[in-house]
């Protein structure tokens, strides 16, 4: 019982990394129109912000660095220093007065997010009991939903016309005087939202640096002794089981994430342009959608260690495909289509590919390169997602005129993720990490 409490406590502490990851993406997304108006940005500028952010390239670069560092120096090493980088990036965004400052702030924050993700998923899995591993990964995923919920709620309260916008105006005049333009005042609502992330990051840093090192990492390091980080990297690229696993996991996650990354960053903007709703309405819809994601993820957490992983996986993707079929049939110009899409996409988020990528990514690799393999896959996925984000802005157009074409692309990507996952879904439920490693790699790895 004590160990169960311990794993839950450490899971919650580490899951704050996911809160900050999703929070950074949604904080940028919810204030995208405000920054666009304040700095006079174009859709291409917005595409570059997405390209280097926590949603794409920044996280990709950070992940490949953080994954191998976590395997070399330990999971606790990442928890001790990484959020200091995150706070630096968020602070730079808060203080931005031009596009280069905003771009660099997004990049630094994104790199920190990428560094933290492989270590956090790995630590959660390694510190979990056999019959709670899926549950703990789902708790981590719930944090990915709670983050956007909180950020969107703050964004709506502080947004122009929001309940607390009068206070935002007071803060803006305090720091900028009385001669500011309307757009300059409005963007302070986004600055304050990023301030909330800075505060949570400071709390999370204090909690995470007190965690004990993963016992499995400690045992692995004691056993290998002479092996270097480069030996483990070489083994990852030369072991045929590891290479096949990387291809499988990158395949299911890449195709799904190309869709999810666009939704994570551009969704409020899409609702405003293609759906023709106000910024406040778009954020409320996004908030409700994230609430659905958290609720469904909670249900999934109760089922995932007792139910076929393949069944849950397939269900989630069928719902995701149904959501995009709404776009090409009903459309999102009216409330029925728009809300149907939002609700279905919320349901799929609670059983999403990311849950299984995080779970299988920690189960299917041995401890010596577990975080590094995840970092490599995260690098591939988020890097290509960054390129797709730029392409998407051209397909989508300035006013959403290419949204139907984009929807067909999304359906095709989700179908690939469904087929690959259905065929390759591993049977790992109810097995220890040591048992899974032994069955897949033998006793010599």
Image (spheres, rainbow, N blue to C red):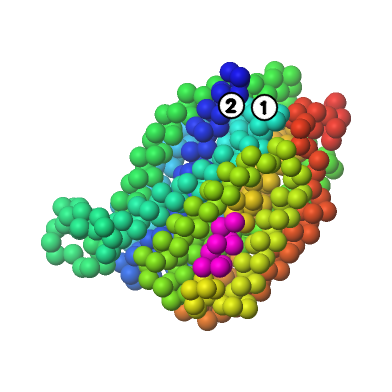
Q: Residues within 10 Å of mark 2 (few under 14, many from 20)?
A: many
Give the percent coordinates (x, y) of residue 401.
52, 81
Q: Is residue 330 left or right of residue 195?
A: right
Q: Residues within 10 Å of mark 1 (few under 14, many from 20)?
A: many
Corner quadrant of residue 132: top right
Q: Residue at x 55, y 52 (%)?
A: 293
**Can you say whether 319 is above or below 75 in the image?**
below
Please check the rendered image and state whether residue 343 is part of the magenta-colored stretch, yes or no: yes
Give the percent coordinates (x, y) of residue 40.
34, 71
Q: Is residue 165 left or right of residue 394?
A: left
- According to the picture, the residue beneath numbered tag 2 turns out to be 7
Q: Residue at x 56, y 29 (%)?
A: 8
Corner quadrant of residue 177: bottom left
Q: Residue at x 81, y 40 (%)?
A: 427
- According to the picture, the residue beneath numbered tag 1 turns out to be 129
Give the percent coordinates (x, y) of residue 289.
50, 58
Q: Judging from the image, what secondary structure is the residue with disc 2 in?
A: helix
**Can you say whether 394 is above or below 165 in the image?**
below
Please check the rendered image and state whether residue 69 is part of the magenta-colored stretch, yes or no: no
Magenta span covers which residues? 339-347
Marks 2,1: beta carbons within 8 A = yes
């Amino acid at each position: 019982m004590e160990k169960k409490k311990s794993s839950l406590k450490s899971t919650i502490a580490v899951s704050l990394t996911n809160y900050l990851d999703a929070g950074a993406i949604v904080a940028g997304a919810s204030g995208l129109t405000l920054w666009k108006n304040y700095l006079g940005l174009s859709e291409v500028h917005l595409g570059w912000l997405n390209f280097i952010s926590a949603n794409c390239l920044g996280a990709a670069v950070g992940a490949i660095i953080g994954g191998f560092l976590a395997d070399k120096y330990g999971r606790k090493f990442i928890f001790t220093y990484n959020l200091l980088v995150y706070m630096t990036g968020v602070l730079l965004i808060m203080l931005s007065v031009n596009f280069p400052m905003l771009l660099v702030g997004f990049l630094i924050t994104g790199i920190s997010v990428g560094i933290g993700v492989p270590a956090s998923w790995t630590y959660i899995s390694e510190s979990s009991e056999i019959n709670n591993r899926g549950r703990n990964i789902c708790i981590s995923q719930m944090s990915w939903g709670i983050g956007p919920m909180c950020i969107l709620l703050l964004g709506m309260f502080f947004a122009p016309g929001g309940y607390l916008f009068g206070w935002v105006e007071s803060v803006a005049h305090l720091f900028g005087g009385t001669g500011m333009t309307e757009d300059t005042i409005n963007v302070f609502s986004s600055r304050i939202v990023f301030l909330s992330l800075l505060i949570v990051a400071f709390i999370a840093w204090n909690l995470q640096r007190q965690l004990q090192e993963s016992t499995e990492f400690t045992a692995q390091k004691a056993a290998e002794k002479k092996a270097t980080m480069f030996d483990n990297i070489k083994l990852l690229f030369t072991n045929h089981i590891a290479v096949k696993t990387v291809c499988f996991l990158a395949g299911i996650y890449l195709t799904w994430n190309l869709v999810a990354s666009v939704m994570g960053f551009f969704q409020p903007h899409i609702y405003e342009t293609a759906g023709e709703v106000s910024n406040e309405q778009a954020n409320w819809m996004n908030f409700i959608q994230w609430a659905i994601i958290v609720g469904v993820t909670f249900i999934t957490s109760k089922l995932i260690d007792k139910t076929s992983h393949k069944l849950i996986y397939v269900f989630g993707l069928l719902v995701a495909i149904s959501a995009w079929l709404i776009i090409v049939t009903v459309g999102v110009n009216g409330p029925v289509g728009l809300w149907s899409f939002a609700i279905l996409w919320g349901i799929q988020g609670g059983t999403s590919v990311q849950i299984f990528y995080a779970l299988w990514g920690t189960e299917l690799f041995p401890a010596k390169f577990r975080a590094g393999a995840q970092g490599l896959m995260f690098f591939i996925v988020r890097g290509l997602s960054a390129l797709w984000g730029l392409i998407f802005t051209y397909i989508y157009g300035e006013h959403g005129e290419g949204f139907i074409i984009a929807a067909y692309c999304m359906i095709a990507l989700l179908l690939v993720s469904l087929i690959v996952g259905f065929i390759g879904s591993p049977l790992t439920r109810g097995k220890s990490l040591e048992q899974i490693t032994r069955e897949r790699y033998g006793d010599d790895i």
